[in-house]
Image (cartoon, grey):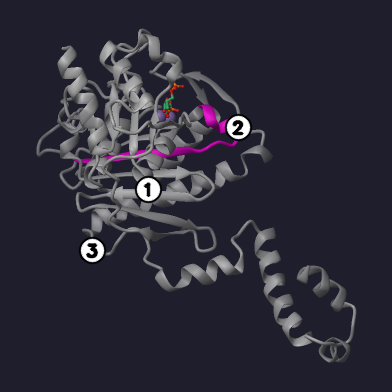
Protein backbone atom coordinates (compact mmCIF):
# COMPACT_ATOMS: atom_id res chain seq x y z
CA UNK A 1 0.00 0.00 0.00
CA UNK A 2 2.79 2.42 0.90
CA UNK A 3 4.70 1.39 -2.21
CA UNK A 4 1.63 2.23 -4.34
CA UNK A 5 1.17 5.59 -2.65
CA UNK A 6 4.85 6.39 -3.07
CA UNK A 7 4.73 5.58 -6.79
CA UNK A 8 1.60 7.72 -7.15
CA UNK A 9 3.35 10.54 -5.25
CA UNK A 10 6.32 10.41 -7.61
CA UNK A 11 4.32 12.25 -10.23
CA UNK A 12 3.57 15.16 -7.87
CA UNK A 13 5.73 18.19 -7.02
CA UNK A 14 7.69 18.13 -3.76
CA UNK A 15 5.47 20.96 -2.41
CA UNK A 16 2.32 19.00 -3.20
CA UNK A 17 3.82 15.94 -1.51
CA UNK A 18 4.96 17.68 1.68
CA UNK A 19 1.76 19.69 2.04
CA UNK A 20 -0.46 16.63 2.03
CA UNK A 21 -1.14 15.06 5.40
CA UNK A 22 1.55 12.55 6.45
CA UNK A 23 3.73 13.60 3.46
CA UNK A 24 7.03 13.46 5.34
CA UNK A 25 6.19 10.04 6.77
CA UNK A 26 5.31 8.73 3.31
CA UNK A 27 8.55 10.15 1.86
CA UNK A 28 10.57 8.26 4.48
CA UNK A 29 8.62 5.12 3.73
CA UNK A 30 9.20 5.69 0.01
CA UNK A 31 12.99 5.86 0.45
CA UNK A 32 12.89 2.72 2.57
CA UNK A 33 10.71 0.81 0.10
CA UNK A 34 12.70 1.97 -2.92
CA UNK A 35 15.94 0.61 -1.45
CA UNK A 36 14.15 -2.61 -0.53
CA UNK A 37 12.79 -3.03 -4.03
CA UNK A 38 16.20 -2.40 -5.64
CA UNK A 39 17.80 -4.94 -3.32
CA UNK A 40 15.03 -7.46 -3.90
CA UNK A 41 15.47 -7.03 -7.67
CA UNK A 42 19.15 -7.82 -7.30
CA UNK A 43 18.20 -10.96 -5.32
CA UNK A 44 19.50 -9.48 -2.08
CA UNK A 45 17.83 -9.23 1.29
CA UNK A 46 15.60 -6.31 2.20
CA UNK A 47 16.66 -3.31 4.24
CA UNK A 48 14.84 -4.47 7.35
CA UNK A 49 16.82 -7.73 7.41
CA UNK A 50 20.12 -5.91 7.01
CA UNK A 51 19.27 -3.50 9.82
CA UNK A 52 18.40 -6.35 12.16
CA UNK A 53 21.61 -8.34 11.65
CA UNK A 54 24.10 -5.44 11.63
CA UNK A 55 24.66 -5.25 15.39
CA UNK A 56 25.99 -8.83 15.76
CA UNK A 57 28.22 -9.30 12.75
CA UNK A 58 30.53 -12.05 13.98
CA UNK A 59 31.82 -13.56 10.78
CA UNK A 60 32.76 -17.15 10.02
CA UNK A 61 35.34 -18.48 10.69
CA UNK A 62 36.21 -17.17 14.16
CA UNK A 63 39.52 -15.34 14.53
CA UNK A 64 40.42 -17.53 17.53
CA UNK A 65 41.29 -20.51 15.28
CA UNK A 66 44.83 -21.27 14.06
CA UNK A 67 45.58 -19.48 10.79
CA UNK A 68 45.81 -22.55 8.46
CA UNK A 69 42.57 -24.04 9.80
CA UNK A 70 40.85 -20.67 9.59
CA UNK A 71 42.01 -20.23 6.02
CA UNK A 72 40.78 -23.74 5.15
CA UNK A 73 37.37 -23.19 6.74
CA UNK A 74 37.03 -19.79 5.06
CA UNK A 75 37.85 -21.34 1.67
CA UNK A 76 35.28 -24.09 2.20
CA UNK A 77 32.61 -21.65 3.37
CA UNK A 78 33.16 -19.41 0.36
CA UNK A 79 32.94 -22.43 -1.97
CA UNK A 80 29.60 -23.24 -0.34
CA UNK A 81 28.44 -19.67 -1.00
CA UNK A 82 29.14 -20.36 -4.70
CA UNK A 83 27.17 -23.62 -4.51
CA UNK A 84 24.27 -21.77 -2.84
CA UNK A 85 24.29 -19.24 -5.69
CA UNK A 86 24.11 -22.04 -8.30
CA UNK A 87 21.20 -23.64 -6.44
CA UNK A 88 19.31 -20.37 -6.09
CA UNK A 89 19.06 -19.86 -9.85
CA UNK A 90 19.18 -23.53 -10.90
CA UNK A 91 15.87 -23.36 -12.78
CA UNK A 92 17.12 -20.53 -14.99
CA UNK A 93 19.99 -22.47 -16.52
CA UNK A 94 20.04 -25.54 -18.72
CA UNK A 95 23.50 -26.52 -17.37
CA UNK A 96 22.50 -26.96 -13.74
CA UNK A 97 19.46 -29.22 -13.31
CA UNK A 98 19.16 -32.88 -14.28
CA UNK A 99 21.44 -35.89 -14.59
CA UNK A 100 25.10 -35.50 -15.54
CA UNK A 101 25.09 -38.86 -17.33
CA UNK A 102 27.68 -40.67 -15.19
CA UNK A 103 27.32 -43.21 -12.39
CA UNK A 104 29.59 -42.60 -9.37
CA UNK A 105 31.52 -45.28 -7.47
CA UNK A 106 28.48 -45.70 -5.18
CA UNK A 107 26.51 -46.88 -8.22
CA UNK A 108 24.41 -43.70 -8.07
CA UNK A 109 23.38 -41.49 -10.97
CA UNK A 110 25.36 -38.23 -10.72
CA UNK A 111 23.34 -35.04 -11.05
CA UNK A 112 24.87 -32.01 -12.79
CA UNK A 113 24.80 -30.20 -9.47
CA UNK A 114 26.69 -33.07 -7.74
CA UNK A 115 29.48 -32.58 -10.28
CA UNK A 116 29.32 -28.78 -10.17
CA UNK A 117 29.47 -28.67 -6.36
CA UNK A 118 32.33 -31.17 -6.37
CA UNK A 119 34.31 -29.06 -8.86
CA UNK A 120 33.69 -25.85 -6.91
CA UNK A 121 35.00 -27.39 -3.67
CA UNK A 122 37.91 -29.25 -5.26
CA UNK A 123 39.10 -26.23 -7.30
CA UNK A 124 38.96 -23.99 -4.22
CA UNK A 125 41.07 -26.44 -2.19
CA UNK A 126 43.77 -26.80 -4.86
CA UNK A 127 45.05 -23.31 -4.00
CA UNK A 128 45.81 -24.23 -0.37
CA UNK A 129 49.26 -25.53 0.56
CA UNK A 130 47.83 -26.95 3.79
CA UNK A 131 45.75 -29.63 2.05
CA UNK A 132 47.33 -33.06 1.49
CA UNK A 133 44.36 -34.90 -0.01
CA UNK A 134 40.68 -34.66 -0.84
CA UNK A 135 38.17 -37.49 -0.48
CA UNK A 136 34.83 -36.82 -2.16
CA UNK A 137 31.68 -38.86 -2.61
CA UNK A 138 31.87 -38.02 -6.31
CA UNK A 139 35.49 -39.15 -6.91
CA UNK A 140 36.34 -42.86 -7.06
CA UNK A 141 39.76 -42.36 -5.47
CA UNK A 142 41.20 -39.76 -3.05
CA UNK A 143 42.85 -36.84 -4.87
CA UNK A 144 46.40 -36.31 -3.59
CA UNK A 145 47.43 -32.64 -3.67
CA UNK A 146 50.70 -32.77 -1.73
CA UNK A 147 52.91 -35.13 0.28
CA UNK A 148 54.80 -32.18 1.83
CA UNK A 149 54.94 -31.95 5.63
CA UNK A 150 53.20 -28.57 5.53
CA UNK A 151 50.20 -30.19 3.84
CA UNK A 152 48.63 -31.50 7.01
CA UNK A 153 44.89 -31.49 6.27
CA UNK A 154 42.69 -34.13 4.70
CA UNK A 155 39.39 -32.72 3.51
CA UNK A 156 36.61 -35.26 3.13
CA UNK A 157 33.20 -34.27 1.79
CA UNK A 158 29.79 -34.98 0.36
CA UNK A 159 29.62 -32.01 -2.06
CA UNK A 160 25.86 -32.11 -2.46
CA UNK A 161 23.74 -34.16 -0.08
CA UNK A 162 20.11 -34.88 -0.85
CA UNK A 163 20.48 -34.99 -4.63
CA UNK A 164 16.90 -36.21 -5.08
CA UNK A 165 15.74 -32.81 -3.79
CA UNK A 166 17.66 -30.79 -6.41
CA UNK A 167 15.06 -30.87 -9.18
CA UNK A 168 12.15 -30.08 -6.83
CA UNK A 169 13.69 -27.01 -5.14
CA UNK A 170 13.94 -28.96 -1.88
CA UNK A 171 16.62 -28.59 0.79
CA UNK A 172 20.11 -29.95 0.08
CA UNK A 173 23.46 -29.61 1.81
CA UNK A 174 27.22 -30.00 1.83
CA UNK A 175 28.89 -32.11 4.56
CA UNK A 176 32.62 -31.78 5.36
CA UNK A 177 35.03 -33.58 7.66
CA UNK A 178 38.60 -32.39 8.27
CA UNK A 179 41.33 -34.65 9.61
CA UNK A 180 45.04 -34.18 10.18
CA UNK A 181 47.54 -36.42 8.44
CA UNK A 182 49.55 -38.49 10.91
CA UNK A 183 53.27 -37.91 10.45
CA UNK A 184 54.63 -40.01 7.57
CA UNK A 185 51.21 -41.34 6.49
CA UNK A 186 50.76 -41.43 2.69
CA UNK A 187 48.24 -38.73 1.73
CA UNK A 188 46.11 -41.17 -0.29
CA UNK A 189 45.13 -43.36 2.67
CA UNK A 190 45.72 -40.93 5.55
CA UNK A 191 42.01 -40.15 5.93
CA UNK A 192 41.25 -43.71 7.05
CA UNK A 193 41.07 -42.71 10.71
CA UNK A 194 38.16 -43.01 13.10
CA UNK A 195 35.82 -40.04 13.48
CA UNK A 196 37.08 -39.09 16.93
CA UNK A 197 40.26 -37.90 15.16
CA UNK A 198 38.43 -35.18 13.19
CA UNK A 199 39.84 -31.69 13.81
CA UNK A 200 36.74 -30.04 12.39
CA UNK A 201 33.33 -30.95 11.01
CA UNK A 202 30.91 -28.72 9.19
CA UNK A 203 27.76 -28.75 7.11
CA UNK A 204 25.95 -26.18 5.06
CA UNK A 205 22.19 -26.47 4.62
CA UNK A 206 20.78 -24.85 1.47
CA UNK A 207 17.22 -24.14 2.58
CA UNK A 208 15.17 -20.96 2.71
CA UNK A 209 18.31 -19.60 4.44
CA UNK A 210 21.80 -20.92 3.81
CA UNK A 211 23.01 -22.09 7.21
CA UNK A 212 26.46 -23.31 8.24
CA UNK A 213 27.05 -25.38 11.38
CA UNK A 214 30.57 -26.33 12.44
CA UNK A 215 32.67 -27.62 15.29
CA UNK A 216 36.37 -27.75 16.01
CA UNK A 217 35.75 -29.70 19.20
CA UNK A 218 34.72 -26.66 21.24
CA UNK A 219 30.95 -26.70 20.87
CA UNK A 220 28.74 -26.57 17.79
CA UNK A 221 28.02 -23.15 16.33
CA UNK A 222 25.59 -21.98 13.66
CA UNK A 223 25.97 -19.17 11.11
CA UNK A 224 23.54 -17.79 8.55
CA UNK A 225 24.58 -16.48 5.13
CA UNK A 226 23.97 -12.77 4.72
CA UNK A 227 23.33 -12.54 0.97
CA UNK A 228 24.29 -8.84 0.91
CA UNK A 229 27.86 -9.26 2.17
CA UNK A 230 28.26 -12.92 1.11
CA UNK A 231 29.50 -13.67 4.66
CA UNK A 232 28.25 -16.25 7.14
CA UNK A 233 27.27 -14.40 10.34
CA UNK A 234 26.94 -16.01 13.76
CA UNK A 235 23.33 -16.84 14.52
CA UNK A 236 23.54 -19.48 17.29
CA UNK A 237 26.58 -20.24 19.42
CA UNK A 238 27.00 -23.37 21.55
CA UNK A 239 24.03 -25.17 20.04
CA UNK A 240 22.49 -27.79 22.30
CA UNK A 241 20.40 -30.70 21.04
CA UNK A 242 17.42 -31.35 23.37
CA UNK A 243 17.85 -34.63 25.32
CA UNK A 244 14.62 -35.87 23.82
CA UNK A 245 12.49 -34.47 21.04
CA UNK A 246 9.19 -34.68 19.18
CA UNK A 247 10.16 -36.47 15.92
CA UNK A 248 11.56 -39.70 14.53
CA UNK A 249 12.91 -39.68 10.99
CA UNK A 250 13.42 -42.70 8.77
CA UNK A 251 12.51 -43.92 5.27
CA UNK A 252 9.56 -45.94 6.54
CA UNK A 253 9.03 -47.73 3.22
CA UNK A 254 12.09 -49.82 4.17
CA UNK A 255 10.66 -50.81 7.57
CA UNK A 256 9.95 -54.46 6.73
CA UNK A 257 13.61 -54.88 5.71
CA UNK A 258 15.06 -53.47 8.94
CA UNK A 259 16.58 -55.86 11.51
CA UNK A 260 13.98 -56.66 14.20
CA UNK A 261 15.56 -54.37 16.83
CA UNK A 262 15.20 -51.36 14.52
CA UNK A 263 11.59 -52.32 13.70
CA UNK A 264 10.88 -52.44 17.44
CA UNK A 265 12.53 -49.03 17.86
CA UNK A 266 10.38 -47.39 15.17
CA UNK A 267 7.24 -49.01 16.64
CA UNK A 268 8.27 -47.73 20.10
CA UNK A 269 8.79 -44.15 18.85
CA UNK A 270 5.58 -44.21 16.82
CA UNK A 271 3.41 -45.44 19.68
CA UNK A 272 5.25 -43.78 22.57
CA UNK A 273 6.11 -47.03 24.38
CA UNK A 274 9.84 -46.29 24.06
CA UNK A 275 9.95 -42.61 24.92
CA UNK A 276 6.88 -42.08 27.08
CA UNK A 277 5.31 -39.83 24.46
CA UNK A 278 4.39 -40.68 20.89
CA UNK A 279 6.79 -39.10 18.36
CA UNK A 280 5.69 -37.57 15.05
CA UNK A 281 7.24 -38.64 11.73
CA UNK A 282 9.38 -36.29 9.60
CA UNK A 283 11.51 -37.26 6.58
CA UNK A 284 12.96 -34.77 4.14
CA UNK A 285 15.22 -37.25 2.31
CA UNK A 286 18.29 -35.03 2.64
CA UNK A 287 20.41 -36.08 5.60
CA UNK A 288 21.66 -32.54 6.27
CA UNK A 289 18.12 -31.18 6.53
CA UNK A 290 16.85 -34.12 8.59
CA UNK A 291 19.85 -33.76 10.89
CA UNK A 292 19.50 -29.98 11.21
CA UNK A 293 15.90 -30.38 12.39
CA UNK A 294 17.02 -33.05 14.86
CA UNK A 295 19.81 -30.78 16.17
CA UNK A 296 17.42 -27.89 16.74
CA UNK A 297 14.29 -29.69 17.91
CA UNK A 298 15.60 -33.01 19.23
CA UNK A 299 14.42 -36.47 18.23
CA UNK A 300 16.10 -39.17 16.22
CA UNK A 301 17.18 -40.00 12.64
CA UNK A 302 17.68 -43.63 11.60
CA UNK A 303 19.06 -45.20 8.41
CA UNK A 304 19.40 -48.88 9.46
CA UNK A 305 20.68 -51.75 7.28
CA UNK A 306 18.22 -52.94 4.63
CA UNK A 307 18.17 -55.90 2.23
CA UNK A 308 19.40 -53.61 -0.55
CA UNK A 309 22.04 -51.95 1.66
CA UNK A 310 23.04 -54.53 4.31
CA UNK A 311 25.82 -52.26 5.63
CA UNK A 312 23.59 -49.20 5.68
CA UNK A 313 23.30 -46.62 2.91
CA UNK A 314 25.07 -43.59 4.34
CA UNK A 315 28.82 -43.11 4.13
CA UNK A 316 30.95 -43.17 7.28
CA UNK A 317 33.69 -40.69 6.34
CA UNK A 318 31.71 -37.81 4.86
CA UNK A 319 28.14 -38.25 6.10
CA UNK A 320 28.06 -40.07 9.46
CA UNK A 321 31.39 -38.91 10.99
CA UNK A 322 31.04 -35.13 10.63
CA UNK A 323 27.41 -35.12 11.75
CA UNK A 324 28.27 -37.44 14.66
CA UNK A 325 30.97 -35.01 15.86
CA UNK A 326 28.56 -32.09 15.67
CA UNK A 327 25.84 -34.13 17.47
CA UNK A 328 28.34 -35.10 20.16
CA UNK A 329 29.46 -31.47 20.64
CA UNK A 330 25.81 -30.44 20.99
CA UNK A 331 25.12 -33.10 23.66
CA UNK A 332 23.57 -35.66 21.28
CA UNK A 333 24.80 -39.11 20.23
CA UNK A 334 25.37 -41.28 17.15
CA UNK A 335 25.74 -45.05 16.79
CA UNK A 336 25.54 -47.79 14.16
CA UNK A 337 23.43 -49.69 16.71
CA UNK A 338 26.36 -51.35 18.46
CA UNK A 339 29.33 -48.96 18.25
CA UNK A 340 29.62 -45.20 18.63
CA UNK A 341 30.04 -43.78 15.10
CA UNK A 342 33.13 -41.83 16.19
CA UNK A 343 34.89 -45.06 17.25
CA UNK A 344 34.49 -46.99 13.99
CA UNK A 345 37.78 -47.69 12.18
CA UNK A 346 37.25 -47.23 8.44
CA UNK A 347 38.73 -49.67 5.94
CA UNK A 348 37.84 -47.90 2.69
CA UNK A 349 37.06 -44.25 1.81
CA UNK A 350 33.47 -44.87 0.65
CA UNK A 351 32.56 -47.24 3.50
CA UNK A 352 28.86 -47.35 4.35
CA UNK A 353 27.44 -47.49 7.85
CA UNK A 354 24.03 -47.83 9.51
CA UNK A 355 23.29 -44.50 11.21
CA UNK A 356 21.23 -43.71 14.30
CA UNK A 357 21.77 -40.09 15.37
CA UNK A 358 20.00 -37.59 17.56
CA UNK A 359 18.93 -36.92 21.12
CA UNK A 360 20.85 -38.86 23.73
CA UNK A 361 17.82 -40.62 25.26
CA UNK A 362 16.36 -41.80 21.96
CA UNK A 363 19.74 -43.06 20.64
CA UNK A 364 20.33 -44.87 23.92
CA UNK A 365 16.91 -46.56 23.61
CA UNK A 366 17.85 -47.93 20.17
CA UNK A 367 21.24 -49.09 21.43
CA UNK A 368 19.54 -51.03 24.23
CA UNK A 369 17.13 -52.75 21.80
CA UNK A 370 19.96 -53.70 19.41
CA UNK A 371 22.04 -55.09 22.30
CA UNK A 372 19.10 -57.14 23.58
CA UNK A 373 18.58 -58.65 20.12
CA UNK A 374 22.25 -59.46 19.48
P1 LIG B 1 23.42 -38.12 -1.59
O1 LIG B 1 22.43 -37.23 -2.25
O2 LIG B 1 24.65 -37.38 -1.14
O3 LIG B 1 23.75 -39.36 -2.39
O4 LIG B 1 22.81 -38.62 -0.21
C1 LIG B 1 21.52 -39.15 -0.21
C2 LIG B 1 21.28 -39.73 1.14
C3 LIG B 1 20.85 -38.75 2.21
O5 LIG B 1 20.93 -37.42 1.95
C4 LIG B 1 19.41 -39.08 2.46
O6 LIG B 1 19.12 -38.93 3.81
C5 LIG B 1 19.28 -40.47 1.99
O7 LIG B 1 20.23 -40.66 0.98
C6 LIG B 1 17.93 -40.73 1.44
O8 LIG B 1 17.88 -42.07 1.07
P2 LIG B 1 16.50 -42.76 0.68
O9 LIG B 1 16.03 -42.11 -0.57
O10 LIG B 1 16.87 -44.20 0.52
O11 LIG B 1 15.56 -42.54 1.83
MN1 LIG C 1 24.72 -37.56 0.99
MN1 LIG D 1 26.02 -36.28 -2.35
Q: Nearer the viewer, mark 2 or mark 3?
A: 2
- Label 1 neighbourhood size at 10 Å, few (<14), some (14-19), many (20+)? many
Secondary structure at numbered mark 2: helix
- Label 3 neighbourhood size at 10 Å, few (<14), some (14-19), many (20+)? few
Disc on res. 238: none
Range of residues picked out in magenta: 164-180
Residue at left offset 82%, top offset 73% = 5
Q: Which one is earlier in the sequence, the residue at label 2 or at label 3?
A: 3
Residue linked to disc 2: 168
Q: Which one is earlier in the sequence, the residue at label 3 or at label 1?
A: 3
Residue at left offset 34%, top offset 28% = 272
User: Which quadrant of the figure has residue 4?
Assistant: bottom right
Secondary structure at numbered mark 3: loop
User: Which quadrant of the figure has residue 245?
Assistant: top left
Identify whether 328 is placed above or below 158: below
Residue 233 is situated, as x and y percent measured from the top left of the image, at: 41, 61
Residue 123 is situated, as x and y percent measured from the top left of the image, at: 41, 42
Residue linked to disc 3: 64
Q: Which one is earlier in the sequence, the residue at label 2 or at label 1?
A: 1
Residue linked to disc 1: 76
User: Which quadrant of the figure has residue 324?
Assistant: top left
Residue at left offset 20%, top offset 53% = 218
Q: Quadrant of the N terminus?
A: bottom right
373 to the left or right of 327:
left
In the foreground, 282 or 173: 282
Amino acid sequence: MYGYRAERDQGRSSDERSSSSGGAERRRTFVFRTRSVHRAKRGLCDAATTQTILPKMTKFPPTTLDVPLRELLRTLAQACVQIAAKLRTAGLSTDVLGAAGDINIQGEQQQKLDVLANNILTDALRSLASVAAIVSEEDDEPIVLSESDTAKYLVIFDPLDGSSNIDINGPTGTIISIMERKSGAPAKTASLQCGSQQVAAMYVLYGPSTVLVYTTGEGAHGYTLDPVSGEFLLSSSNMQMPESGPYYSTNESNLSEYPVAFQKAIEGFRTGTLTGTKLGARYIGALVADFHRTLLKGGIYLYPPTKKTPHGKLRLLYEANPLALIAHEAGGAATNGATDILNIDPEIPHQRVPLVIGSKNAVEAVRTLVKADA
